[in-house]
Image: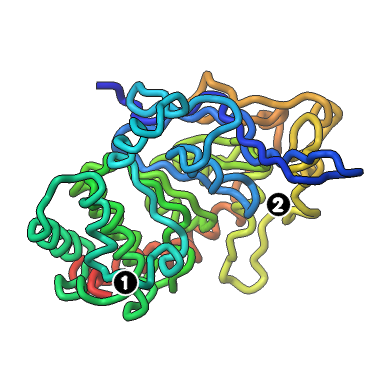
Amino acid sequence: MSDVILSTHELHKRFTSSRGVLGAPSHIYAVNGVSLSIRRGETFAIVGESGCGKSTLARLLLRLLDPSEGQVIYEGQDLTALPAAEMRKLRAQMQFIFQDPFSSLNPRMTVESIVGEPLLVHGTLSRKERREKVADLLRKVGLRPDHADRFPHEFSGGQRQRICVARALASGPKLLIGDEPVSALDVSVQAQIVNLLEDLKEDFGLTLIIIAHDLSVIRHMADRVAVMYLGEVVELAATEALYTTPRHPYTRALLTAIPVPMPGARGQIAALGGDIPSPANPPAGCKFHTRCPYATEICKTTRPVLENAEAHQTACHHWRSLPPLGTDAAVTAPRSAATEARFALYRDAASKTAGHSK
């Protein structure tokens, strides 16, 4: 059995607007040439600013969107070439947790109907067996079996997200993708959902792909991290390597943006200036050069590619010559102060039993 459960090869997604300048069609380049390999059983994170294409990439991985170019390979099968009927069968093995736990639940359906729907679509269980299965799934995500007869509006945000997790698990998936699954929740509830996902990963033997912008959450739960900027992966590394020795200027800037709860403490790397360039008209060369303090002429003309020779891959012409981080507060302080405090909350929030009952 291959160690890779899911991979992409030069994946692209372009959206075409009805009218551009002078009435000509305008293309929005959401994902540009992304090639990734997700290992079986790992937690893989994709991070970046809003608008960088990470959510679009997540939908492409499950073919909720069809790519403009490229391939998505799941256990040896090219998802982009599968007919709809075959793709529907595979969806039982690949499930999605959406960002907003309220809008992703049908308000007219009971929890039993919501969680049991994948069992009805992909399985052959009787109504009694489905109800028993739903009750078991609710227990596993920290809810009570009698919650099955309620409607989504009767639950808190954390409980609704647990319902979404139970629904995603109903078909017995191997791969679970969470599109910022905790960003809409309170911090204490975030900790409980993170702990829940980690427990379920072990119990069900899942592979997790997490889309997020909260770098504290990612450092706590991910094995590897891909950093995206304007539709491209600019850095890919094991989590600790990326947080302790970030190579790309954009990654450094993201780490600098983590708040440091110490009066007067500031990172040695200046915060990013300017706005993200328009994906309808991306700059030539390195797409980050318009905001990068280390950019030179080659950055404006030649697009850097991820170096495949190392486990720590970086798409930057100058990463070897960037000034060392040393004891830079932008990297070390969040770990020792803000992030460490949050880690303690994640570790201790709701002791495995009480924590799953929120």
Residue in the image at 31% along x and 72% along y: 159
Residue 207 appears in the picture as rendered: no
The reply to whether dot 1 and dot 2 touch (C-beta < 8 Å) is no
250, 190: nearer the viewer: 190
The quarter of the image holding the N terminus is top left
**C-alpha gap between disc 1 and disc 2:** 40 Å
Q: Is residue 288 left or right of residue 305?
A: right
Look at 38% across and 65% down and name the residue there. Answer: 105
In the picture as drawn, the residue positioned furthest to the right comes out as 22
What numbered label is drawn on residue 159? 1
From the image, state whether disc 1 or disc 2 is nearer to you.
1
Residue type at numbered disc 1: Gln
Question: Based on the displayed image, in which of its 4 quarters is residue 98 positioned?
Answer: bottom left
User: Mark 2 sits on what residue?
Assistant: 269
The single residue placed furthest to the top in the displayed view is: 309
x and y percentages locating residue 288 in the rendered image: 74, 40
Count of numbered tags: 2
Q: Secondary structure at mark 2?
A: loop
Q: What residue is shown at x 37% (from left), y 51% (from top)?
A: 221
Q: x and y percent of residue 164 in the render?
A: 33, 61
